[in-house]
Amino acid sequence: MSDKVKVIVTTGYGTNCEVEMAHACTMAGAEQVDIVHVSDLLDGSVSLLDYHFLNLPGGFLDGDNLGAAQAGAHRLRYARIKGTGQSLLEQIQKFVERGGLILGVCNGFQLMVKTGLLPRLEGSSEERTVSLTYNDSGRFEDRWVTCRANPDSPCVFTKGIDIIELPVRHGEGKFVTKDKTVSNALSENNLVCIRYVSPETGMPTQQYPYNPNGSEMAVAGVCDPTGRLMGLMPHPEAFSHGTNHPRWTRENLPEEGAGIRFFRNAVEYIRGNIL
Amino acid sequence: MAYRIEVALKPHLKDSLGDKTVKRCREELNAPIEAIRTIKVYLLDFKDISKDCLNQAVFGPFSDPVTQVTSLDRPLAHDLPFAPDWVIEVGFRPGVTDNEGRIATEALALILDREPAPEEKVYTAVQYCIKGNLDHEQVERLARDLLSNDLIQRTAIFKASDLERIWASGDNPLYAVPRVSAESAINVETVNLNGLTDEELAELSRQRVLALNLNEMKTIREHINLERIITERKAVGLGPYVTDVELEALAQTWSEHCKHKIFNADITYVNKEEGTETIIHSLFDTYIRKGTREIRDRLGRDDWCMSVFKDNAGVIRFNEKYSVAFKVETHNSPSALDPYGGALTGIVGVNRDPFGTGMGSKLIFNTDVFCFGPPDFRGTLPPGLLHPKRIFEGVREGVEHGGNQSGIPTVNGSILFDERYLGKPLVFCGTGGIMPNRVCEHPGHEKKAMPGDAIVMCGGRIGKDGIHGATFSSEELHEGSPATAVQIGDPITQKKMTDFLLRARDLCLYNSITDNGAGGLSSSVGEMALEAGGFELHLDRAPLKYHGLQPWEILLSEAQERMTVAVPQDKLDRFMKLAKKMDVEATVLGKFTDTGKFHCFYEDRTVAYLDLDFVHDGVPTLELKAVWSRPRHTEPDLPEPESLGTELKAMLGRYNICSKEYVVRQYDHEVQGGSVVKPLTGAMNDGPSDAAVIRPDLDSYEGLVVSHGICPRYSDIDTYHMVSCVVDEAVRNAIAVGGSLDLMAGLDNFCWCDPVQSEKTPDGHYKLAQLVRANQALYDICTFYGVPCISGKDSMKNDATIGGIKISIPPTLLFSVISRMDDVRKAVTMDAKRPGDLVYVLGMTYPELGASEYFLSKGAVGNSVPRVRLKEARRQYEALSRAIGQGLVASCHDCSDGGLGVALAETAFSGSLGMHVDLDAIPQDGIERMDYLLFSETPSRFVITVKEEAKEGFEKIMKGTTFACVGKTTEEPRLKFETRGKTALDEPLDDLKQAWLSPLAW
């Protein structure tokens, strides 16, 4: 690969945040940003291995039928790339082995969790150890939440972020773990890279609506032990411009939206470590 | 024998669906229920699945090992955290769209690594496991009134203690698969119209649900008996009689829904008030089309209207690169029968309008306006009507699923309540799209199917869904309304199709595109044939959901998620390959021709052969009469209220005024990343925005303003003023956030009760006069403001006669507006910003409380209907747009339902700031009472806040308009009104806000 930062944003089968996610990557300084339909990956005309950074955007893969991203994860596992016999998930795993970055937002996070791409705790890479299930409210909700990044996390994307406001827009965002061992492992390794916090205290909270879905440990997002793979329910790409913020007419906000930081961190990491 | 998989949440996890159902059971049915857990059921109607594959399915796509437990061919109800008393299983009836079943079928096919046979499907159902001391009748009521809709669903009810016995029995009903069984042989009927008496012709129309009147039936008979026609038909193998395919196609094309016969009728309009009589040749031409023409002529070379009234949506120029298409539709009758499916179909259906406009547009926003009966209605409902709260919930959820899953932000809307919407709710769904100004070196808003182009149908398959939808919506509801009128949309099939077609568009693979909505192929192919000059369509080649559809049913079916595309033969191969690759079903059904014929085949035999001209222009013009005399209502004699504070809180808590946050939050209003002014705004993100602002192109600061106006109550006095107030409100809302009259376009959606005089409608002359006056007002105000109508729709039969009682909706116009902003950073929201800012009221207040929310709350109507003073209003809008453009306005709120009292309170509490107002300073004329001053609904007014330092600049710009500084915002969280130095109202902000927040906070 050349010295260009190359980003792929997937779409198709109900994904719907690909345009703003690609826009965020461009704003963050990536030289090449391609929106690619899953069918282009499946017929082999595009390969993930030509990219540094894979974005799995939000949306409703298969309409959330069978559970959010359930059918999507199944497709990645079973559908074969034309002429290779390899599944798309196998290609993603190869992409990860080669040092690529993955950011999954909302439905993309659900997909990462349901394919076992997150949290990839030691010794359990394929097995599903955490999940995202129905919000305690029983509803899809669109609202802005306050989050706080974990400064001790290995996560590449959240470096330098402290408190950040972002929108959540989901019905199945409640983070749950299989058991205590898993939640302990997540905490001990600082894989919980971003949490819902109370806007008043800045502390992680279980209180609705600050924790909008009832997530265990107030988890808004997690990363894998390398920090290069991250998923979160809030939408950083939806805060690309100051006017995205619900109170921009009341508060003096910078023109660039705070959500761009996630993408800039990724681009800078690629420049510093991969190119 | 099918396989049965059951899936439930692990016992330690909260079952939100179950909990929500318990809450509704208690609240709405007063049922003594302790707990409900839900179980998802998958019935796999597949042959021979190996044990290994079954396990892969159960523990793969069908369940989540972290959160769920499963069972295979065994009841899971025993593994719940409690022992249930009752089990209700709700599944679909045969042929009803089962989206989850379809996805499950696809998932299973991946495991089996083979294409499923046509009859192999997965069917889904939900089991409600109920703990509670209920008798069988109560459980039945629960199933019927809350958990299922008999039209589309089937239920099985049994005691949990019987489960073992049922499963052990040889004939377990839980394994009954809702497979559609092919019943009838394929058959094309011919209908002999000759020799039928008038009564017999009318009866034939009724019996076949054709909704054609006698004159229309006779016109068909005459045409089919023309010598030339007989000869031509003979030459293609048809006999002397009309076929059912032809009759159905004509009935559909000539339906009120498609041909707008009332809007195009010759009307004799008698105005008794003025003693005049005029003949109007088409309301549409005379008032709507003419108004738009005049505005475009005035704009001359700067005309920014690109395509009006001729395509599926209206199109205006947005900037050098893009144009915007906008359309609003209604889906009232289906939403009355199946609120969820009806509304879901409404939203995904209207999506296809801008999508199928010009060469196609990318969808960028949705808007929704709902009119329901009161949610707390306690009266007796006639059988066949659903409770308004159930309609509300179903419609809300349908639009939620349709809009959210399609990835289109729902940016604007409202919900109105009136008892007259009990019979028919109104469900307005609107969608905007953006298209490049140039597509494949042609103007993006134009299209032309060419003779020889292949007719390709893309997307979903055809079933009996929505057969007679177009004719049905042209009729009033009755007990026997057909269940097939109901469809359930499938947003994901549609999303896949739109992803594919946008790519095909940019690869220049087609010449024309349109959607399949009302009237199905008959309508889509029939309309595109006007571009080419004819068509040949092979009905037997259409992909079907199940066997047994008659040729006319294939032609007329309104099965959703389908677009028809004209593909040049030399691009057909590429088009079809791309479809296959992107997992979208596309089928060649025939070709466009220049023969002038509407020509359908079934297995190579001609089954319809009509002149295209006759199909499209043969419908005879209606001749109608309208008589206007002004209704007189009692002028109420209300005592002056003791406490204005109490009155204000009561007004804030009215269903028509209170917060709709419950609904708004469940709609994604910021997907696509261009949200600028959201539906909820202010210090706590819960203030009611007047309009939306979005940035459709993320690389630009240019913005699109979206707003609407609606106030059906004023129709009780005069529809002329109802319409002017509606248009004024839509315009005002757009101005309030930063839109301007320089580039603003409107859509008119008329929902009327039947205005044709008949035995059933003895007041038809008056209702038609209401329609005439509405159109006159629309022309007057639109041309004065320079806001052209670019598209619209009418729905004319919003009556329900059930159990001998006729309920007619109040004549309702929804006016939707789009406007352009140069720079979204200039947008303004409605919440007060800082303490110490100056509060202004713009516009004069008159004692206009006729049909106001305040009078309604006192059980009165009155006669002093609010009126628009056009000149003053326009001058004010122009000045305000300049002030906003110069950044002089801190907040701006439209003043409408509930008047100044409500607007001032909302401005204050949305900004979490108090306000101190001198009521005597408010510009007013003829007002004698403080309650009238606060609650009058005179249009064209705003509440504005301005920074102290912007005062001079603001007042200079507004000079020459009516406005006054009436007070200040305060740190102290109280709303204080004063008159003649005395306190008239003094309320804590929190109390006012709670009154406004709580009524619909379900």
Image (cartoon, coloured by chain):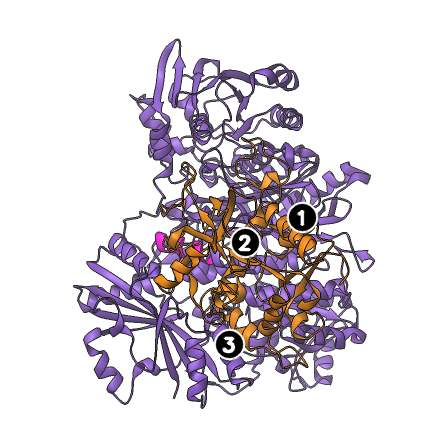
Chain colours: A orange, B purple
Which numbered marker is on residue A37? Answer: none
Camera-nearest residue between B902 and B498: B498
- The residue pinned by badge 3 equals B107
Left or right: A28 in relation to B211:
right
Q: Does the magenta portion include B822?
A: no
Please give the residue where the numbered disc 1 appears in the rendered image: A28
Which element type, helix, strand or loop, lies under badge 1?
loop
Residue B934 seen anywhere in this rendered image of the structure:
yes
**Amino acid type, mark 2:** Cys
- Left or right of residue B777: residue B753: left
Q: Earlier in the sequence, mark 1 or mark 2?
A: 1
Point out the stretch of residues depicted in magenta: B387-399
Residue A11 drawn above or below residue B416: below
Neighbours of disc 2 within 10 Å: few (<14), some (14-19), many (20+): many
Disc 2: which residue: A155
Quadrant in which the N terminus of chain B is drawn: bottom left
Task: Give the chain letter at badge 3.
Answer: B
**Where is residue B360 shown, x and y percent of the image?**
69, 59
Q: CA distance from mark 1 to mark 2?
A: 17 Å
